[in-house]
Image (spheres, rainbow, N blue to C red):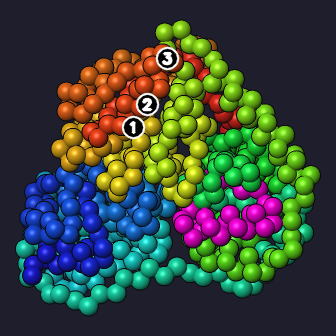
């Protein structure tokens, strides 16, 4: 076999079902090889590399196994960088395969050449170039292993003239084993917990899986410990559970989750670290001891932890649960949290009851959507004020059923991620702003061509609203560069061959939601709202930030 087929063979043996990409001269031979693997690996041809990278990222988040993106040399690699950085910041397993300059031209600054290694090294767990046929399969197996073991993207560049050279089939080992917790660390954490009067668990991506969710829920119930989540931890515990406080932190934190973080005397971060997002730029720091159980090797350089365990959070929680048998969090602490929760519920009610002349109320819309959200739904979001509605009103009931570009702050993730979720058999629902959707709207063609029944809710306020609000409040109303016009998104969807509907009043919401969820085609719901509509958020913490 040649190098291209050798790589396809490894992907097949590793269980890869899809490759997302855009063809180019530097990878045409690899796409040709994928033709021979049609029965086991589906090639999804996209219209922009950010989309292909985001779809691969989403698959990694949803399955725990690396999604695979294929990109052309130089321009294609640069286009994919935003999606790769999302995966890196959020700890999502992913393998990016790109073409590269021919070996005899490498380093000569030729056409379609940039220093791709220099671009990718800061935003991946590993980045390397394959420029000889020997050991190709071992190299790909290593990339997959690193992506899973270290929870992040890995970049592999293949010289353009290498694909068709002869290679050999190898015995490969894919090592996905994650470091285990030390007994001494677990014992120290158990001792701190027993002494705690205001304990809180912060659940992140590393505990957000079926087994982790089961262990976390059982442990929280047994010890009566409240649980908040990071943006990537939503679903680690059912958000309808009495002990779940919802998401904490900038861009969607609830009042009770944020206040519980701030006033806790013992914060146990499981499968996450205490990031700038969770702490509003490190301006909303807990009062007591902080423990982090994470695989992020950078965690210790950010804040001083009471204890930091570089280990698998699921394994850590198993061991911790075996050492705690009679601890219960004080009822006074739970009662204090309940007071904050009531204030948050009142804020949500006020937001949903508002009326906007000539526009729909987005809070009410998402409240209604939550009431009929399918049990297999995966909600995907990028960045912008629109995500606050999804954070506040859409309840995440199971692991990894809400995914977003949380820690990079990039727009453009929501729509591609929802497409990937749909391909995996979920009801993929993208929650995007109009500004964000216009960055990836071209891939409606991909959704139609590939028959992906993705649902897209465009929260359309004709603005970059986060910055519009800042200009109104902080710049004395000097509005500049934040208001714009949009096409008719419902009509645009129809032009692409999808379906669409416009909602510009509250009375239209229920029928539109029903039509969207019942459609078997890609569907765009254009939710037209006032740029001055209220999105619930923690104002005090945000001002500190």
Residue located 28% across and 59% down the image: 69
Residue position for label 1: 517
Q: 330 or 413: which is nearer to us? A: 330
Lower position in the chain sequence, tag 1 or tag 3: 3
Q: Residues within 10 Å of mark 2 (few under 14, many from 20)?
A: many
Local secondary structure at mark 2: helix
Residue 28 image-quadrant placement: bottom left
Res. 507 mark: 3
Give how far across and how far down residue 517 sits, in percent. Answer: 39, 37
Give how far across and how far down residue 60 sits, in percent. Answer: 40, 62
Label 2 vs label 3: CA separation? 11 Å
Q: Which residues are magenta?
A: 204-230
Residue located 70% across and 67% down the image: 218
Q: Is residue 474 above or below residue 443?
A: above
Lower position in the chain sequence, tag 2 or tag 3: 3
Residue position for label 2: 513
2 and 3 marks in contact (CB < 8 Å): no
Local secondary structure at mark 1: helix
The answer, for residue 303, to whether it is visible in the render is: no
Q: 296 or 317: which is nearer to us? A: 317
Q: Is residue 197 magenta?
A: no
Local secondary structure at mark 3: helix
Q: Residue furthest bottom?
A: 171
Label 1 vs label 3: CA separation? 17 Å
Residue 3 image-quadrant placement: bottom left
1 and 2 marks in contact (CB < 8 Å): yes
């Amino acid at each position: 076999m040649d190098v291209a087929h050798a790589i396809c063979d490894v992907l097949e043996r590793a269980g890869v079902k899809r490759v997302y990409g855009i063809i180019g001269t530097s990878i045409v031979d690899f796409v040709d090889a994928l033709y021979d693997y049609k029965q086991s690996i589906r090639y999804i041809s996209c219209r922009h590399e950010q989309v292909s990278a985001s779809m691969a990222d989403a698959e990694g988040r949803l399955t725990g196994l690396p999604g695979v993106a294929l990109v052309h040399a130089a321009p294609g690699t640069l286009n994919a960088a935003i999606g790769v950085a999302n995966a890196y910041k959020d700890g999502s397993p992913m393998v990016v395969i790109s073409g590269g300059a021919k070996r005899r031209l490498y380093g000569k600054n030729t056409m379609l050449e940039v220093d791709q290694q220099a671009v990718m090294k800061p935003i991946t767990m590993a980045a390397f170039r394959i420029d000889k046929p020997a050991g190709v399969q071992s190299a790909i197996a290593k990339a997959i292993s690193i992506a899973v073991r270290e929870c992040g993207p890995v970049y592999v560049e293949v010289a353009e003239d290498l694909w068709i050279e002869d290679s050999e089939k190898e015995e490969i080992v894919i090592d996905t084993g994650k470091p285990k917790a030390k007994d001494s660390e677990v014992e120290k954490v158990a001792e701190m917990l027993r002494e705690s009067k205001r304990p809180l668990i912060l659940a992140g991506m590393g505990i957000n899986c079926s087994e982790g969710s089961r262990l976390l829920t059982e442990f929280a119930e047994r010890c009566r410990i409240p649980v908040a989540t990071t943006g990537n931890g939503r679903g680690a515990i059912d958000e309808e559970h009495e002990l779940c406080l919802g998401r904490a932190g900038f861009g969607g934190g609830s009042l009770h989750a944020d206040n519980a973080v701030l006033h806790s005397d013992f914060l146990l971060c499981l499968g996450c670290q205490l990031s700038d997002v969770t702490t509003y730029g490190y301006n909303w720091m807990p009062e007591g001891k902080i423990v982090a159980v994470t695989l992020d090797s950078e965690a210790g350089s950010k804040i001083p932890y009471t204890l930091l365990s570089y280990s698998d959070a699921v394994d850590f929680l198993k061991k911790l649960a075996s050492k705690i048998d009679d601890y219960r969090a004080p009822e006074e602490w739970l009662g204090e949290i309940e007071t904050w929760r009531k204030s948050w519920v009142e804020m949500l009610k006020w937001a949903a009851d508002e009326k906007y002349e000539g526009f729909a109320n987005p809070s009410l819309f998402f409240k209604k959507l939550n009431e009929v959200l399918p049990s297999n739904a995966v909600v995907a979001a990028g960045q912008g004020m629109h995500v606050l509605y999804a954070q506040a009103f859409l309840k995440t009931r199971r692991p990894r059923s809400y995914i977003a570009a949380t820690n990079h702050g990039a727009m453009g993730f929501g729509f591609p991620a929802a497409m990937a979720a749909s391909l995996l058999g979920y009801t993929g629902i993208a929650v995007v702003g109009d500004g964000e959707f216009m960055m990836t709207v071209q891939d409606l063609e991909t959704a139609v061509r590939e028959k992906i029944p993705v649902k897209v809710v465009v929260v359309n306020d004709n603005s970059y609203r986060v910055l519009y609000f800042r200009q109104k409040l902080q710049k004395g109303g000097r509005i500049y560069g934040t208001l714009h016009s949009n096409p008719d998104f419902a009509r645009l969807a129809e032009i692409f061959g999808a379906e669409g509907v416009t909602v510009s009043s509250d009375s239209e919401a229920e029928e539109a939601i029903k039509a969207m969820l019942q459609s078997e085609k890609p569907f765009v719901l254009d939710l037209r709202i006032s740029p001055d509509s209220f999105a619930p958020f923690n104002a005090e913490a945000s001002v500190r930030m």
